[in-house]
DNA sequence: GATGAATGAGACTTCATTCAT
DNA sequence: TATGAATGAAGTCTCATTCAT
């Protein structure tokens, strides 16, 4: 693996704390809040890259959305590639953080697993931005994710949670033995991801809308069923 | 849904997408052949669009790969968009044709289902081109698939096959009742698709290669298990 | 003046008189009538160049309109420039021929002049193709007209006619003395030309249609009035 | 008539269309100036479009003449079509402004009319750019002029002036009654326009140069004579 | 005489990036 | 910190013309 780096953390902060937020138009303000500006750019970039992919994204559109000048992007992020890296890391951070909000230890293992599945399903279905960003990154052969030091690091706690749930389920003889946590996560992700990632081609194939609330509600139940059928299958115990 | 159209090819010749380049230079080969030229362009386009997505693809690279002049692409396909439509339809045709090669009626319903899952898994895993093309199309909101008349048409036989299998499995009381064929296909697709579509980000997350033959062989078994556990679950019968 | 040449006359004719006009589709006929083919190309070219100007004209459109292959144009006319020359000369020939159909000697000079004006007005107004071709040629600095040997040659009889009319009118003391034939022709042309040549910009300026039959009929009277007022003006006699 | 729009310029500076290039290289000149850059592009475009027509004009040549980068044209004007619209409107503005510099009320009506004719004659003869631009626009069926909101608007004062002159001439019984201002303008334009618009084809026809100062001076007198003969014709009073 | 596939130069346009202020 | 004018490389597409059959 090559040298990795992270673009997520803003290099400086709080240094111009003395400058009060100007009440006058930002346009004429001269000095603005560096942290806020950086954040506005980052959020605009996350949306733009999710919407159009890397090469379809336009620096100008990001500027317009963030209400900043072109130069600011280069000032804060260096170039389009590094801005994209920052957007990618930021996006991963959101879902990983949310996963860690689950309490894995207290609950019934089946319920804990169900909660993780539902969280994943809901996160991916509610806002397609994350899914689209990941798809785009894979179309680019993951060349940016590879440069990131934070992405593998953020994955560890997720795997730990899954292993904890599995271990307790197997100990209580509710789950199959020999279930691989990594592979289980891949299955969950696949089942929760596909109708978002392939929403449009599936719609063309089947001539129906895969983002309909009713369909989603039903699909959510099915995904949980599929995973629990498998994990509780007597054949494997 | 707007008026749809199809850009799919003229008189077919049964090529796969990757027939090898002719041995001698076309330049000295003598006979010029419109059908062959068109086909060479189409195959090069399928590869290029799969590799780089629509906006990342370069007309010049397609020309080089197809060993034709730029103008030929515009002569045969009109523009980049329509060439992409033709490539997309051609790609769908390959998997849909392969699915129809399965014999759905004779076999044991569980074996028939397993065969369909394995065919899907193998098709997607063996050559990532199709998966990448579909991902790209979804990143573009399916705007090209929507223009296609042939894509929904090609989907009908697949659904029919699945329904036939399901009906027989339910009649023989091996399958759950009330399984929706469409939703089942989405599950199968999700389980077979994710490690190809998300190969690179998953690799970054888990620091391992999701295209390794050993891993794939194991994953293939698991996917079949997951689907059959669900479909044969006593709880639903 | 540079060496001039003419592209108007077809180089060969009647040599395949033995081949009967085929009743079957021209498409499969193999041999076609060379003279007719050349003529079809020429007429299509006259229309195309009039419609789109030289650089806006498309060889392909001319082929389609003439129902011939691209190569035929190069076979019969050499290249786009020479085809344009042929179209230009052909167009001039039509109006010059028509002018010579007037009988200049017998009539009352005022009536003869009036007939020439009306013929010019009608010719230009009825079909804007000629006007457009001339405009285009002037936009190209007359570089093609300069190459033509036939254009100045065709002008002589027109000037002769005008001089004849003028001389008789002056002899009969109906016309001013010292009227220059050339300059008079320029005036007539200007008055008959402008609403055709500038039809569209005048329409934008004045927000009315300068090709309306009623307006044209009134304009025709006015043009005759303007010229005759001038030519019969007492002040100049 | 469709929705119209105007591409005419930002804060004006009273240039004519052909202000000379600045002495020192812009590159080393220091200050960059958006207004000046825009104006340089506009002037270069007016010349290029007049010289070569729309489709014969080359963006690269305009860039070279304006000493700017290609991107600037698209930054300031959007595309070739809109640049052409701006050039067209700017050209019309020049002649319409000049017409309004005449004092229509004070003078003898015949003198006022004569002044307008001479101004028109001189404007069109002195610099053929305007005539060529108009010709080209008409060859394009006036499709750009139709999009302009300013062109019909600029025409109003011209018509008002003519009507004022006519009314006073008729009141003083020097002019014919029932002279239509619009039609009169068309006549004046035709007489002043033709030797410029058709300069090259007339030269080929008559084998003489219609831009010679002597010929122009004589023609100028004749045009005035033709119009005044008509407008003062006793027959119509 | 006729066909139409193929060519290649050059057109318009886009866009990430730099730089003087 | 912020601005926005300017750059230049590269992209898609067009079109007159040639050539093997």
Image (cartoon, coloured by chain):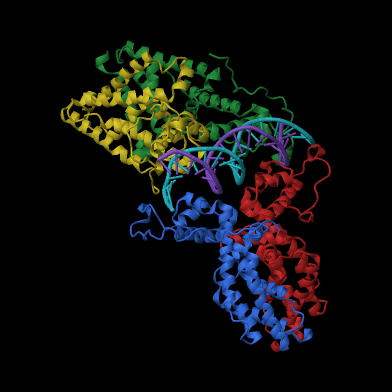
Chain colours: A green, B yellow, C blue, D red, E cyan, F purple
Q: Is residue A116 visible?
A: no
Residue E17 locus on image (x, y percent): 66, 30
Q: Nearer the viewer, residue D12 or B98?
A: B98
Image quadrant in which you'd find residue D49: bottom right
| Residue drawn at 60 percent across, 78 percent down | C118
Q: Quadrant of the N terminus of chain D?
A: bottom right
Q: Is residue B13 visible?
A: yes
Residue B180 locus on image (x, y percent): 27, 34
Q: Nearer the viewer, residue D22 or A138?
A: D22
For the image, the number of numbered tags is 0
Q: Nearer the viewer, residue D135 or F19?
A: F19
| Residue drawn at 79 percent across, 76 percent down | D112
| Residue drawn at 21 percent across, 29 percent down | B103
Residue D186 locus on image (x, y percent): 67, 72
- Give the side of residue D99 with respect to residue B40, left or right: right
Q: Residue placed farthest to the top in the image?
A: A171
- Vertical comparison of C176 with B9: above or below: below
Q: Nearer the viewer, residue B223 or D84?
A: D84
Residue A150 locus on image (x, y percent): 55, 18
Q: Quadrant of the C terminus of chain D?
A: bottom right
């Amino acid at each position: 693996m090559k040298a990795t780096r992270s673009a997520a953390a803003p290099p400086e902060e709080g240094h111009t704390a003395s400058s009060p937020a100007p009440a006058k138009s930002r346009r004429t303000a001269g000095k603005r809040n560096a942290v806020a500006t950086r954040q506005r750019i980052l959020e605009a970039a996350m949306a733009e890259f999710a919407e159009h992919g890397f090469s379809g994204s336009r620096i100008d559109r990001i500027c317009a959305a963030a209400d900043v000048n072109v130069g600011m992007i280069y000032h804060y992020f260096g170039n389009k590639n590094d801005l994209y890296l920052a957007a990618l890391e930021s996006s991963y951070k959101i879902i990983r953080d949310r996963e860690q909000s689950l309490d894995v230890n207290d609950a019934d293992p089946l319920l804990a697993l169900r909660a993780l599945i539902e969280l994943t399903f809901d996160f991916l279905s509610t806002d397609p931005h994350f899914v689209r960003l990941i798809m785009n990154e894979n179309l680019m052969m993951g060349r940016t994710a590879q440069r990131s030091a934070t992405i593998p690091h953020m994955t560890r706690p997720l795997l730990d949670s899954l292993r904890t749930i599995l271990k307790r389920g197997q100990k209580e003889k509710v789950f199959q033995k020999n279930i691989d946590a990594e592979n289980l996560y891949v299955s969950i992700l696949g089942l929760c991801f596909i109708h978002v990632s392939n929403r449009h081609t599936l719609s063309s194939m089947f001539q129906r809308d895969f983002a309909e609330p009713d369909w989603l509600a039903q699909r959510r139940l099915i995904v949980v069923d599929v995973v629990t059928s498998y994990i509780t299958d007597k054949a494997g115990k």
